[in-house]
Amino acid sequence: MTNTFDLYKIKLNYMKQTNLKYSCLIAVLYFGMNVNGQTTPQDTLPKEQKIEEVVMIGYGTRKAVDNTTAISSLKADEVSKTKVLNATQAIQGKIAGVQVTASDLPGSTPTVFIRGLGTVASKRSPLYVVDGLFVENLNNINTNDILSYDVLKDASALAIYGNRGANGVIIITTKSGRGKGLNVEYDGFIGVRNPLRKVKMAGSNLFSYYNNIALQTTKFSQDQPVNTDWFDEITRTGIYNQHNVSLSGSSDKAKYFLSLNNYDEKSILKGSDYNRATVRTNNEFRIAKGIIVSQNLSVAFTNTTPKPLGAFTTAYRQSPIVPVRFADGQYGVSIVGQDGFASPIGTGRFNDQGNPLAQLELNNERQKAMQLQGGIKLDADIVKGLKLTSQFSGEYYHYKNYAFDNGVRLIGQPAASFTNQLTNNNEDYFNWQLTNYLTYNKVFADVHNVEITAGTETTFKSGYNRLRYVRQGLSGNSSYWNLQDLDYVANGSLKNFFSSDENENRTVSYFGRAQYKLMNRYLLTATIRRDGSSQFAEGKKWGNFPSFGAGWIVSEESFLKDNNIINLLKIRGGWGRLGNQDVSLNVPTLASGGEGYNYSFGGTLNSNGTTNNQLLDPNLGWEITEETSGGIDFAFLDSRLSGSVDLYNKITKNIVLASLPPGPAGIGISGFSHLGQVSNKGVEISLGWQDKVGENFSYAINGNYSYNKNNLDKVFANVNIIQGGSLGNGEWTKYFGELAVDQPLGSFYLWEANGYDANGNIAFVDTNGNGITGKQDATDRKFFGSYIPKSTLGINIDLRYKNVDLAINGFGAFGHSVYNGKKAQRISGDNIEYDVATNFWTPSNMSAQNPVPSAGIPAASTYFLESGDFFRVNNITLGYNFAKPVEHISSLRFYVSAINPFIWQKFSGFTPELNANGNPYELAGVELDAYPSLRSFVFGVNIKF
């Protein structure tokens, strides 16, 4: 197993030669200092050769032993070991305090919360910093290119990023040249994917029996000739593969790195394909003594054939008596004939569900995107101890897609004038960033170690430029969709046109940081950043974001230095203020014409008036978060046992929310103001044991646990109420407003199911005691917790025996609820689960688990709310390494991986991980049109030349 202190981490280029004990202490600090507690057996370097571990702290690095903040780091192979498309998904369960909710849908973006969710309507995701460039996500990053993954979690560390730091920061450092001469590496795998869990549905005969009871008539025959498994009809065994080739090397004057990667997936949803190709080149040139110029450039191309995820819900609800196709080749539809069988003719449809396979096959959509990122950086030593860093980075993104509806009318649809429709979308944006800073480092009198960083930063975001147009009545042949010189307006085919160019956003920032270490054991850090943003009004453009931290390395004191048990004991704490500038803004909306806006003189209408129709708050600015935190890092028993404990209290005091003024103010459109407060309080614990047995066997066992209490502390009067989590049938599941105070964000707001009434229907609790229950009394609704887990657990095991290595990773989430939205949409004629069809209320089975069959739309109640608790084995990887098997091959490794092979869950649906688009007041936590979690088996090879 690769040594943690190997060169895959950014390291200092010197070692302690004079103090062996101090060197050993530093060598183990990584295990205790980093909250994730990832450890790997140390068995290849003698103690005197241990290189001191450093972490990325934003605009610089810091020896882990000298850091006063909560920063967790992962090495490259921990990220790339799990063979997934998005690097963020691979860190799930490896870092305490970082909650990752991911979907296996190719190209999707995981939802990441660092120390809880602190906002309602503003940006929720952390800031990603890739080689110094601020980016939105890691969708375009090849995991094999990542060198290190550093997560800044507390305000003391995050304040250096000012008004971008409120949601945490993830710093990605990509690989650079290494080794002498040319080094070539190939890593490739191929794998298969299937749903991790299926829901057993009723077959045709049980469906007929159940729905006949619901309709109180014999409409469906109980001897059906067709028994369609719609889930099997729309899915297939997914196949995915990845190939990565990298070339790297270095000399006295230059370092170079080039990687080429291609990821391709035929997903489990039929017809849905995804391909991503990336190219990255990182080069470093030593121009002269003390002057280094670095360049990085990456480009990613994605090509997607998406299919509607609603097909999963349709497949769940459509009846098994409906054939995929009728005998004449037409798609099957939900019409029943006189014989009680599905038929092309009949009295009408018995449910409103379509044909799931037709839904996929008649969908014709294509998406393409290109994302270019790069930068150039200068590092120059001005005088001894003083270094200048200047970096310019930029990003360009272009996306286009088409969606063609061929206008095919299925059997049973009402007669209408059907025509085809083509929708085209194009969008792009451009960002750039210029950063300049000085770093001064000096040791005075051998006991005072001072490092000062000061700099400026300017960023520019062009905003999205979007163009959308819709045409109808086109040829079914795509070659004739875009004919030159054809006037689509004149011939009437252009039905809709939309163009927008978002406002530019510019920021100017000044930042400074001072770090002080006294006698290698007393630590102080102070940071200040001043940000100015163009998107806020005069007087609200500038903000200050300070922080401070302190630490005490107790184990360096004389009373502990010579003990044989405690190798490291460190206490640290800090405070900081952070900002979130990605908030909803007040954009003046002008209303003109219409009644009330026209002016007349002498009874004659002379002119149209114009007025502002939106509430504008001149005090609107960014959200501000303040956090106080503290922690203890330790290592015992020759550093075999190590870990950390962290506590924090984080408060966002001025969350931005929409509101309308009370009374007849003449304002028709909501504006945004600072109208609430959210808090997150929690604890993070990591613990690891690493050791060696004999000469050939080494192992490491690590665990991390996080607990977070999220709470809406207050909202002010007149805040707009949000009724979210819509099920698309008139029912909704979530509420935000004054009633939600003292509840976690994203809480479910439902009627409480309370057994059955005399007829076997769901009964509800009469909360207010007025004798009215259910849909007739909306005030009976109550809060029943959030979809956001209160606690998470990660377990990571690494074993090595000679040339064999085994890694096992598991992740669990607890203390949250999920809503079975697809089940809650059910009405008469929809399919039901096998368990429902075999155990429902009857006069002779009044204690059944399910109510009597019903034909109505069910109320949004706790009957559909289930525990979201689960524990899953995320990854099992077994590898065998050949050291220099033949000439010209330095190493050869074969590996097999099982990704998500096992899960223990309480939820009866497909998956308890339901991030949707990440919005807490939309479908996050609701299983509706959701992509199932997948089980994957992979075979791969790694070759180094």
Image (spheres, rainbow, N blue to C red):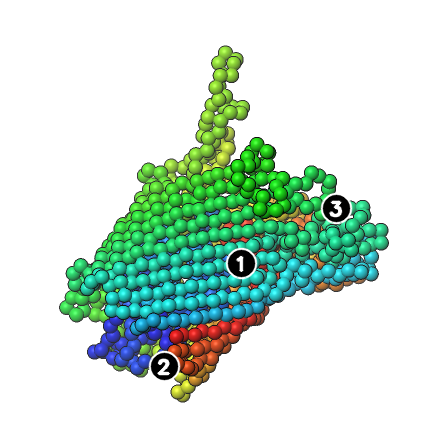
Q: Is residue 197 left or right of residue 140?
A: right
Q: Residue 285: image x %, image y %?
A: 26, 62
Which label sits on residue 43?
2
Q: Secondary structure at mark 2?
A: loop
Instruction: Tell me the CA gap for discs 1 and 3.
Output: 34 Å
Q: Which residue is more in the foreground, 818 or 150?
A: 150
Residue at image mark 1: 274
* CA neighbours of label 3 inside 10 A, class few (<14), some (14 to 19), many (20+): some
* CA neighbours of label 1 inside 10 A, class few (<14), some (14 to 19), many (20+): many
* Amino acid beneath label 1: Tyr
475 relative to 711, above or below: above
Q: Nearer the viewer, mark 2 or mark 3?
A: 3
Q: Secondary structure at mark 3?
A: loop
Q: Is residue 933 left or right of residue 458?
A: right
Q: Residue 694: image x %, image y %?
A: 40, 88
- Kindly give the residue lying farthest to the bottom in the view shown: 694
Instruction: Tell me the CA gap for discs 2 and 3.
Output: 71 Å
Q: Which residue is more in the foreground, 476 or 204?
A: 476
* Amino acid beneath label 3: Gly
Q: Nearer the viewer, mark 2 or mark 1?
A: 1
- Count every numbered label the image shows and give the total: 3
Among the two numbered marks 1 and 3 on one chain, the one whose residue lies closer to the N terminus: 1
Q: Which residue lies at the image location 71% right of the left edge and 39% below the top edge?
A: 416
